Image (cartoon, coloured by chain):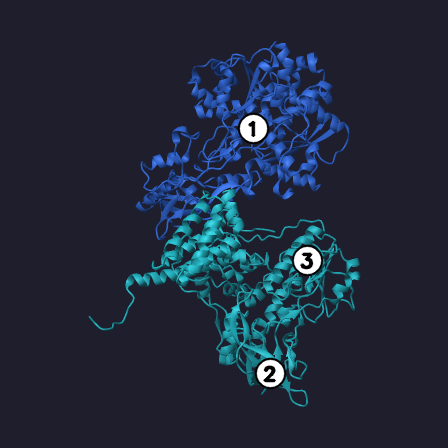
Chain colours: A cyan, B blue
Amino acid sequence: MSRLSIITPDYAQTVVENLYKDVERRITASPPGICPIDISNAFLKMCHAQTCGKCVPCRVGLTQLSELIDEVLDGTATLEYIDIIEKTARVIKNTADCAIGYEAANMVLRGVVGFRDDYVEHIVNKRCRFNIYQPVPCVALCPAKVDIPGYIALINSERCADAVRLIRKDNPFPTACAFVCEHPCEARCRRNMIDDSINIRGLKRYAVDHSGIVPAPKCSEPTGKKVAIIGGGPSGLSAAYYLSLMGHSVELYEKRDKLGGMLRYGIPSYRLPRERLQEDIDCILSTGVKAHTGVEIGTTVTIPKLKEEFDCIYIAIGAHNDKKIGIEGEDKRGVISAVEMLRGIGDNTLPDFTKKRVVVVGGGNVAMDCTRSAKRLGAESVTCVYRRRRADMTAQPEEVSGAESEGCEILCLQSPLRISGDEDGNVTAIWVQPQIAGEIDKSGRPRPVNANAEPVRLACDIVIAAVGQGIEIQPFADFGVNIERGVIGTLADNEITNIDGVFAGGDCTTGPATVIRAIAAGKVAAANIDEYLGFNHIISSDVEVPQPRLGVRPACGRMNTKERSAGERNTDFNLIETGLTQEEANAESSRCLRCDHYGYGIFKGGRIDKW
Amino acid sequence: MVNLTIDNIPVAVEENTSILEAARLAGINIPTLCFLKDINEIAACRVCIVEIEGIDRLVASCNNSVREGMKVHTNSPKVREARKTNVELILSQHNSNCAYCPRSGNCPLQKVANDLGIYDVVYKKREPKTLWSHRAILRRDASKCIKCMRCIQVCDKIQTLNIWDVSGTGARTTVDVSHNRMIMDSDCAMCGQCITHCPVGALSCRDDTDKFFEALADKDKVVIVQVAPAVRAAWGESLGIPRKYATIGKITAALKRMGVDYVFDTDFSADLTIMEEGNELLKRISEGEHKYPLFTSCCPGWVRFLKSQYPDMVDCLSTSKSPQQMFGAILKTYYAKVMNIPAEKIYFVSIMPCMAKKREAALPTMDDAKTGRDVDIVLTTREFVKLIRSEHISVEHLKEMPCDYPIETSSGAGVIFGATGGVMEAALRTVYAVLEGHNPEPDAFKEIRGKNGIREAVFKIGDKEIKTAVVSGLGNARKLLKAIRSGKAHFDFVEVMACPGGCAGGGGQPIKEGYELYAERGDELYNIDENSEIRYSHENPAINSLYENYIEKPLSKRAEELLHTDHTAWEMPLAPEKI
């Protein structure tokens, strides 16, 4: 017998470890609409398997809890059960010796509070209020409801032009989205249950890179109705596209010189090349949309005048006002706002940061855009300062790591205190207060609280504030448009609550959000404006989706999009990402599980052919 | 064409043919349970699975199409094991009390389990509990439901009422009334299409045969039966009698054998309906253009549909009662006197191809003779077949018998009420005779016949152009109503039947798995019409004597009292989006 020995996992343990990973991925791909009691009972059973068996509350209590909940689900419980479940869970939470027990009980306890109505429904009416209602996870999570399995199958059949046609049924920005969409579609991809989600955006990029120019479909017969759209960003342009296809006469008013909104004036060209954005815009305009650029609403054109001339108005002005950090010294020379900087870049007026030390304040995607742009503008050093932890950043993780590999620094848990300058008013430094992660707040992230440490001085020449954007509401508020909490108040159909025939959507109604949400708002507005004008035009696509493959591709790797090397790309504004190769696109598109055909999708809601 | 082999037999079929279809074309029958062509191809039961060489997992044959060079095996060891296991799994959640199930002997689950030689199930039985109102006419037994989802699909896709939905999630998933409603509180039209498309005994219609036998046993009661036109075209199917021998004469003889006192033909009151509804139409036409058409009202499923989906259009319904209820009202008033039987002693039974008729007979407005109900009970065609079986009547040995005095005659116009378009045609024959002063050719309006769910025709009668439409199936009705409401379509007279194919395809008709028989049944009714001596409702002597001796003329005061009804006098739950 050795005194000590190296512990190596046995075969069974290795298998179990893999099972844990399987469970993790499976939970990631959990479909919405599952009975919360059923799923939490399943978790409870799993927790119970972790019990070591030493202590009473955990060993016995969790079994009893689970059996009580089983009875609720089977419809054999009475209302008293809820109290017994609650009491038992409370006692386990208060008395279990370790987290295996008290956290399991806490989960049940949260459920009894969080979905008590569902407990009551199961007990009283023996029914569950939940149904699986979103059968295709990617489509369900896409705000614009793009037919993702459809276009992936088309890409798999080398029919990229058809893929673009199919995407355009729900989203007139296939190219822009291929480059910059936040791809919420990938989050719950069922392929996670096997290995990893599909690289949906990468495949879309492959489609738009290989489709050639795909003309827009024909417009319906002219209806004689006129719609004015205020704002030439993704939401306004999307609404314009569909309304034009429906046969309405559309005129679009844009304040800036060029169309594209935040796609042009917010997103740097290393993520979305201008000429590629133009492809989408050209297609949209080809449907007959009349665009007036450089027109400011409230001065050259007034809303009452538009209201008079047009049958309907859609307001999609976005959120282009910068927010202040709210610290001392923000008026010093060298403090610029993210919106201002990115707007300049959009108009090709590039600031010169050569030999400058730049600090960016913020933790979102815009902060990352500024950080990475500053590096490209020749800055000597770029530091992004954020008050929470890195994991709490709202920027996409690949943006953060991209910035880092390009030579930028991410400084987390530092809250800006004040900006100091020289006698001429030029920025010399930003002072930050170190933070520690506190208790979890409403956003689910730990609240940053001041650490017991001295403020730190970060010497710099430029401070870029990227702490959020607001909305230029004045001309609209003057006209009487309902403003709620700084944004335009609308109903679910995008109709403005208080003025007939005026709709609004996109960032100006939600605050800064994603491109695909703005596009979805434009689509929704188009449908409801059509309805408002007394029509029921159907937007559909005649592209036939290929039959699904019969076998499933065995577990394999995800084909990730590759990037140019950091050392090469950080000096220019050229595109970072390189698209998938044909070989990769073919392999990646073959991984799609076709949830439109297999599973619930074939029964209900698998394919939305038209809207 | 796509070339493949199925069980080593070379097959060439068109592209996009399902493997199941391809196999059937090659004479190979793959068993199915949930499959319902064009309506439910969701591969849920996994009984139709096949093995394809080169593909690891088994493939559902019902909704996957053939590919070039494919090698399919429908009975490989892997398939055998899987098919049998899947059926055993289904059986583990299925109440297999076949001996007293209404679908016994006519059940694809029973058949497939027997065919596969399943005599024991290793799995523990876990039958879901049923929570269902005992008062409901439409019954659901959760312990028999195999979750094939056909009821949901038929109601969604054919009838567009969405009464059924998946309920719950996980292992407890079942089917129930949508939006967590009770069936009685839903806008169910009670067409019964979910029942006729249920593969097992999960959905059924309340059985009233015991009440019938009780009435026969009651010496104080005179049991009188009316038989709807569509019954004769279908009842023989489950007894194995060819359509042409399954006549109304045999039905009459069978009922008499059971001890029924009088048997009448609902064709008679169909003729009566034509007299009233036809004259309503004439009156309406003479008033000039209307925004909306006059709709027939003889189908209670349709009346329920309109009341729940488009309540603002209820006044477009003809006020004429359905033939069933006209018969009840007139039998218990006028004929009771003619036959010298006190109305309260009459126990009036109708045999109908329909479930909604059970509900219609129970409406508070259907008691003109003040006996409680003008029609005491309604039996479906399926229940009628059950009566014959429980009485051990061998139909082939029965001699045909005529209907009883005093209602011995009916017309071919009345018979075709049982097929889609029949009411329209019968009405036009009479309307023509009134406007032109002479009869049309009996088949002058056959243009409106056909198999399409929506048919339109314009007929010139006298100096009038009558724009007509015929619809069957509530989804089609909804489509037509939308067109009418949006102004895209305009008609004078529209016939609507809730069930596809009209009463011939009614929810109370015999069930034959995998077959829609309404077209054949409808053809039989048109055959009977063609061979009838009387082809016009207004030439039925029984009708003429009824008007002469009692009602006076169509739409008279007495007609309004007995033969017409107020569709707004009872409540119907509204469609969920209307609430």
Residue occupying image coordinates x 56% and y 24%: B526
Residue A490: mark in rendering = 3
Indicate which disc, 2 or 3, sits on the residue closer to the N terminus. 2
Residue B503: mark in rendering = 1
Figure label count: 3
Could you tell me the amino acid type at mark 2? Ile
How far from the left and from the top, in percent, is residue B40? 48, 42
Determine the secondary structure under disc 3: loop
Residue A601: mark in rendering = none
Image side of residue B152 versus residue B407, left or right: left
For disc 3, the neighbor class at 10 Å (few under 14, some 14 to 19, many from 20) is: many
Query: Where is mark 2, residue-wise?
Result: A430
Query: Can marks 2 and 3 be said to lie on one chain?
Result: yes
Q: Chain of mark 2?
A: A
Q: Chain of mark 3?
A: A
Residue occupying image coordinates x 65% and y 83%: A334
Q: In 3D space, how far apart are the residues under numbered discs 2 and 1 (Cα atoms)?
A: 84 Å
Could you tell me the amino acid type at mark 3? Thr
Q: Chain of mark 1?
A: B
For this rendering, which residue is in front, A20 or A204? Answer: A20
How far from the left and from the top, in percent, is residue A603? 49, 46
Q: Nearer the viewer, mark 2 or mark 1?
A: 2
Of all residues, the one furthest to the bottom in this rendering is A423
Q: Is residue A343 above or below residue A430?
A: above
Q: Quadrant of residue B439?
A: top right
Q: Quadrant of residue B440?
A: top right
For this rendering, which residue is in front, B107 or B56? Answer: B107
